[in-house]
Amino acid sequence: MKRTLYIAGGFTLAFLMQSNLQAQNTQPKDTTMNRTVVVEQEYNPDILDASKVNVLPKVEEPTVSKKEVEYATTFFPATSIPADLMRPYVGTEVQPGSKPGYIRAGYGNYGNLDLLANYLFRLSGRDKLNVRFQMDGMDGKLTMPEADTKWNAYYYRTRANIDYIHQFNKVDFNIAANFGLSNFNLSPVQPGKQKFTSGDFHLGVKSTDENYPIQFEAETNLMMYNRQNNNTFFFNDKVGETQVHTKGLISGAISDEQSINIGLDMRNLIYNKDLKLADDLQVYENRTALALNPYYKLSSDSWNLRAGANVDLSFGSGKSFRVSPDITAQYIFSDSYVLYAQATGGKLVNDFRRLETICPYALPAAPILDTYEQLNAAIGFKASPYPGLWINLYGGYQDLKDDFFEVQEETFVNYDPSLAGDGQEGNSSSPVTAHQYLNLEFSNANNFYAGMKISYEYKDLIALSAAGTYRNWDAKEKYSLYMKPACEINFSADFRPITELNINLGYDYIGRTKVEGIKAAAVSDLHAGASYNVFKGVSVYARINNILNKKYQYYLGYPTEGLNFLGGLSFSF
């Protein structure tokens, strides 16, 4: 009954609000026809790896050859919420000509649910409207990691979106509205439920005439977010966040290959209530974060160079002034060999949306700071010695200020019968009851990393990839490294023996960092999936995760599903 109510409620909210996370409208720099590329999904049930890490080094892989426009579109990012309950599906944007409508529906054990509906209205040659609804979730019994007890867990996440774009002769105009709802319960030792409600309104413009020496992009977003519960042991109150997020970029061409660019990113965050701790410190502070990004860019047959800086100003919270580099260099030789290096950084604003991405189960009882990546420096070599084969080697160093980490804390409160239920059982015979909650704290951290990736593709018949990354972490607070990845290994194989059938096999491994002789269980997920086009516009798909039935955690103290599957139908029209 609970599941039915959530599904019905999700659909009702979607049609009332007509909003969701903004559909990604990536646009190539070619002709006016190419500018009509919008989100038209060719769905393939390949599931992304989702390691639950706050901030990991990102190494920009170089692009060697100019190929036909093809965009990777992730409907939920790699930090899918939560990673182990709602695995994201991957789509690929294609040129216009595909059918504008798509519906997908799937169900599995643990109550795993997958619903998606998307329709693109081509109102005219210059006007397009995309409407989208998506709902993922689960409702099943999970085994707690520290004790052989069952938890009746549920987690439902609903997103709806309406996105409109009009193409003027020299400018694209975009307007969108988005709505999100997350409903879930907390673990038996962390009593209560949680609900996140979000909505935002987007306006954006972008120049499209490349004959002009000046190019520009600008957008503004009014974003609202409400957390229903904020640690009932300390506050027992709702908190709403209102954010005005403004972004801009202006580029001036020096020549056909060179340009001077200035980027701006400003966030104004306001909270409707003060949540103060015993020492009068506020958990969430009103603040303004302003980031300026001036840089020089060179793109030639042999060189891709970007040289600039990230200048970050903060008003109302945190360090008021920080600077980090924004430098990338790629040298291409023999057509398919690349040497590359980078030194980047910048601020990561920890607003409510990012807190949900980092750990939705957390009930912060400490001041929330913004994370700053002071430096992410790397060097690498990428080569293609044989057609379809790519080898990428890289290594680097990352320095983080005020990096998040999860802490399981305990508090003692007077017994309250209202806290019982949903697996939260108090001890009514005692006036004082111990309860745990998941807190978020901060520590400076750094890591050296090295990795390798090998991939091979042969036509549309086979695609293989294997990657491994090793990290050596250090932090001011050693216990902050407990859930950090020390070693990551990923393998994926896609086979298409016939046109209608696609088969995928993959394995994800995340070894955790040992802290004072203790190490969390490694993530070990062997998974397989397949999709088959039964009729024109009708496909069936199935996916099996955690085939080895391993026990591990993406979030501290929270279990994952055992062997689980999901299957369903998709329709394009």
Image: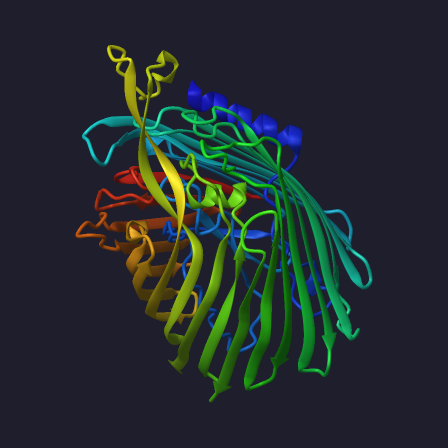
Task: Classify residue 318 as left or right of residue 109.
Answer: right
Residue lying farthest to the bottom in this orientation: 334
Residue lying farthest to the top in this orientation: 429
Tell me the quadrant of the picture where the N terminus can be found: top left
> Which of these two is toward me, 416 or 320?
320
Task: Classify residue 38 as left or right of residue 379.
Answer: right
| Residue 144 vertical placement versus 71 (above, below) | above
Q: Position of residue 328 (x, y in %)?
A: 52, 75
> Which of these two is toward me, 225 or 156?
225
Say which quarter of the image contains residue 545.
top left
Q: Where is residue 96 in the image (x, y as percent from the top left)?
A: 65, 57
Identify the residue shown where x is 55% and y is 51%.
Answer: 41
Identify the residue shown where x is 51% and y is 27%.
Answer: 228
Query: Can the viewer see residue 191?
Result: yes
Identify the residue shown where x is 50% and y is 34%.
Answer: 280
Task: Classify residue 30 as left or right of residue 336.
Answer: right
| Residue 106 vertical placement versus 376 (above, below) | above
| Residue 487 vertical placement versus 86 (above, below) | below
Identify the residue shown where x is 55% and y is 86%.
Answer: 302
Query: Can the viewer see residue 32?
Result: no
Q: How many numbered marks appear?
A: 0
